[in-house]
Amino acid sequence: MINQVSAVPAYARKTRIGLGGEDVLLRLCLAGLGLFLLFGLLLPVYTLLSKGLQDADGNFVGLQNFVSYFREPSVSVVFWNSLRISVLSTLLTLAIAGVYAFALTHSRMPGRAFFRGVALVPLLTPSLLPGIALIYLFGNQGFFRSALFGHSLYGPIGIVIGEVFFTFPVALLIVLTSLLTVDRRLYEAATALRAGRVRIFFTVTLPAMRFGLGAAFFATFTKVFTDFGVPVVVGGSYPVLATDLYQKVIGGFDFQMGAVVGILLFIPAAIAFLAGQLLQRGRSGGIDGRAVIYVPARSKMRDLACFGFCSAVALAILAVLVMAVLGSLFKLWPYNLSLSLASYNFAEHEPSGWGAYRNSLRLAAGVAIFGTAVVFFGAYLLERVPGAAWLRGAINFCCMIPLALPGMVLGLSYIFFFNSPSNPLGGIYGTMAILILSTVVHLYTVPHLTALTALKQLDPGLEAVGSSLKVSRFVTFGRIVVPVCLPTILRIASYLFMNSMTTISALVFLYSANTKVATVSIVLLNDNAMLGPAAAMSVLIVATSATVVALQWLLMHGLLRRTQAWRGTES
């Protein structure tokens, strides 16, 4: 009988970790990743939860803070405002994103690449920008204020419109992914059975969309429920949990009540996240790897209707962006609409001047470099290094927590944890280091999943081959894994850079006079009724993010051309 163990190729066998120097170092690196998440995520969140159960002197009072908070007359109003706004914004976003995704995948309308590109523009903008643009469009002195039929922009109307703009690309990408996996054979079978277009939609297309719509619902709901940027600009006197948390901590220095609001903000977001994860797991089990990509046939009426709908949505997105640009150029809106660059002279409008924008660049660069290194090497340790299964499982679980943790809650937890006199790490409080750390932790999950996906596609025998040749795993990582995964690394760095430029929620609690970033500057400028400079700073952020996207595309294109040339030479 053939020995089954020896029949397995050497490169396919799992290498057993011993107690050599390299193995100990790898385990120490894995432990280091665990410590990073412990001090950057778990302990701050635990401190926040503890503060919610303590009084101002640090004495344990149980749920007394929650009882006191809910006794406030406005609390139920704030909570239900947040819930109503989140549900309404999510439903509108899903309706628009669902039709838009259907048009991109199930029609032959012209300009599909253009429409897809325009739909992703809001990803480059801070959530403050749509609120600012909406003031120019529909505010009390806006150009189209009559379009609201006498209703005020400031309140639920403005928040819903701004949130739909801000969350639209997120919902679109999720629904688009579900539609791209629809098997063409299902449509061919339905056509062979002489089913009409309406029946095919309800029996084939809509069932294929339901998982994507469900996942998009929970993702969008979480994003709206925890967003701070849109409500703080156009919320007016309509309070939601995010602005209530800001007012209690920044306006009233009531940290105990702030901890209570932070916990209340976290619970619905965590529930929505868990529901979305369960839905995604149910979907992944039903994907057929033999599916054939669906290519729709031409239909003049359908293609024309899809083109009209996508044109209207794209026009609305571009109108918001163009209005923000024009608003930054108006000399004195609404009295003097001549164009000027005066709003970009930030030194005349706030003490930090251009310093806030430079700080954002420093923050984004630091997050991109440090975050990419930690995320990718951490994912490599979790995916490719055997041994310590319990530790890897615990770290993997912790890596998913930031996706369910609102940024404002993380920022508030950092105040409690790092500002404690007994914390030896308190020296980073008020510095750029804490902004970089909080941003990396806040954005950790998506790059982590991206890195894991890329590493799973590598041959599992790479490390085994290197081990048989007595080549260090670190050498294999540097000479093989990194070059092969370089496109993924670039995508991770670009994602971290852009989101660091646009994020506001955690930073609004952690900045100091010397580390004020551009998004915080926008909030302060808006509070001081300096709408033009606020729009100018927003436009700078968009321009910077767009530049990064363009550079990433050029680098990826260059890498692809070099790979194709190398393959041509080899063949």
Image: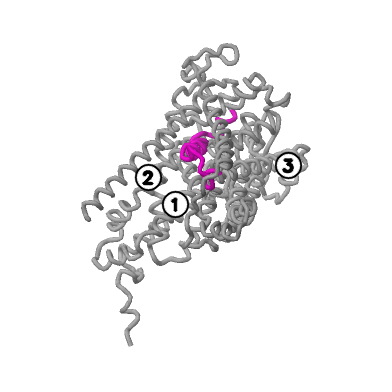
Q: Residue furthest left?
A: 569
Between discs 2 and 3, the one toward the N terminus: 3
Camera sees residue 456: yes
Viewed as shown, does residue 290 lie left or right of 66? left
| Nearest to the observer: residue 221 or residue 398 | 221
Residue 133 in percent (x, y) is at 57, 26
Between discs 3 and 1, the one toward the N terminus: 3
Q: Does dot 2 land on a helix, a strand or a loop?
A: helix
Check the picture and name the quadrant holding the C terminus. Answer: bottom left
| Nearest to the observer: residue 270 or residue 175 | 175
Residue, disc 2: 490
User: Please, what is the dominant secondary structure of the magenta stretch?
Assistant: helix
Residue 222 in percent (x, y) is at 61, 46
Residue at point 43%, 54% (across, down)? 33
Q: Does dot 1 land on a helix, a strand or a loop?
A: helix
Against 360, residue 352 (above or below) is above
| Nearest to the observer: residue 544 or residue 164 | 164
Dots 1 and 2: beta carbons under 8 Å? no
Amino acid type, residue under disc 3 in the picture: Trp
Q: Quote the CA–CA distance across marks 2 and 3.
A: 41 Å
Q: Quote the CA–CA distance across marks 3 and 1.
A: 35 Å
Amino acid type, residue under disc 1 in the picture: Thr
Residue 23 in percent (x, y) is at 34, 64
Residue, disc 1: 450
Q: What's the magenta region?
A: 103-131
Question: How many badges with numbers are in the image?
Answer: 3
Residue 105 magenta: yes
Residue 135 magenta: no
Residue, disc 3: 80
Camera sees residue 42: no
